[in-house]
């Protein structure tokens, strides 16, 4: 999973690469999991907590995210941080993940790209008892 992400990230030639998975990828394997999904146009997406920082320019995006992270469950507030016109373009225009990352890249002055991962497990983090039980089940089955 990580090797796949790194190969795609390096080939993508961005300052920062973010790993994402579609709702379909996740729920086809783990329908019981509760995730936060972004709807940017196209498939709904969930973050995977996989990031590839290729250049120092990526730190602009990291600094932005550190300030915006408190709103991660409310994507419209994150979009609003780019200004009303950009927020409307992203939220109403729903241009798709590539265009959104292109717009955000321009606003932050860095090249940000997404890698859509075909691994449902990539989107599962452990921030609840239910998630911990799921991860334990995944590891048990993998043995």
Image (cartoon, helix red, strand yellow):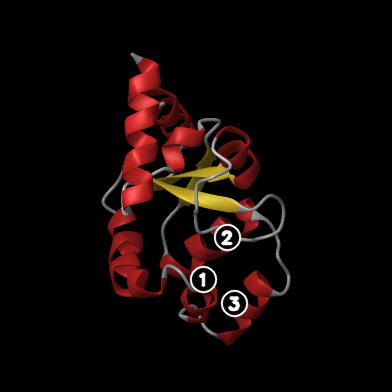
Of 140 and 105, the residue lying toward us: 140
* Crowd band around label 2 with a 10 angstrom C-alpha radius: few (<14), some (14–19), many (20+): some
Q: Examine the image and state in which quarter residue 121 appears.
A: top left
Q: Quadrant of residue 60?
A: bottom left
Cα gap from disc 1 to disc 3, whole angstroms: 13 Å
Q: Are marks 1 and 3 in contact (CB under 8 Å)?
A: no
Task: Give the label on residue 38, or none.
Answer: 2
Nearer to me, 6 or 25: 25
Mark 1 and mark 3 lie on one chain; the one further toward the N terminus is 1
Q: Residue furthest top?
A: 143
Vertical relation: 137 (above or below) 106: above
Q: Residue at x 50, y 31 (%)?
A: 119
Left or right of 64? Residue 47 is right
> How far across and how far down the image is residue 83, in percent?
52, 83
Q: Is residue 117 above or below residue 73?
A: above
Q: Earlier in the sequence, mark 2 or mark 3?
A: 2
Disc 2 to disc 1: CB gap under 8 Å:
yes
Query: Mark 3 Cα within 10 Å, few/some/many (few <14, many 20+)?
Result: some
**Vertical placement of residue 113 versus 86, above or below:** above
Is any atom of residue 51 visible in this view? no
State the residue at coordinates (31%, 50%): 129
How packed mark 1 is, by other alpha carbons closer than 10 Å (few <14, some 14-19, many 20 or more), is some
State the SS at label 1.
helix
Q: CA distance from mark 2 to mark 3?
A: 16 Å
Give the image location of residue 71, x and y in percent. Answer: 40, 74
SS of the residue at dot 3?
A: helix
**In this figure, which residue is indicated by the disc labeled 1?**
75
Find disc 3 in the rendering and name its residue: 86
Q: Position of residue 124 (x, y in %)?
A: 41, 43
- Residue 97 position, x and y percent, is 61, 53
Q: Is residue 55 left or right of residue 85?
A: left
Q: Earlier in the sequence, mark 2 or mark 1?
A: 2
């Amino acid at each position: 999973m990580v090797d796949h992400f790194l190969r795609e990230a390096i080939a993508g030639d961005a300052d920062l690469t973010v790993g994402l998975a579609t709702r379909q990828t996740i729920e086809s394997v783990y329908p019981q999991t509760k995730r936060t999904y972004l709807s940017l146009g196209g498939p709904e997406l969930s973050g995977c907590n996989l990031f590839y920082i290729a250049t120092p320019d990526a730190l602009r995006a990291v600094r932005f995210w550190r300030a915006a992270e408190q709103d991660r469950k409310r994507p419209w507030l994150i979009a609003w941080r780019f200004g009303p016109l950009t927020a409307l373009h992203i939220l109403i225009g729903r241009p798709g993940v590539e265009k959104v990352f292109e717009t955000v890249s321009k606003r932050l002055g860095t090249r940000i790209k997404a890698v859509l991962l075909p691994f449902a497990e990539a989107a599962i983090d452990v921030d609840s008892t239910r998630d911990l039980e799921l991860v334990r089940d995944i590891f048990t089955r993998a043995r």
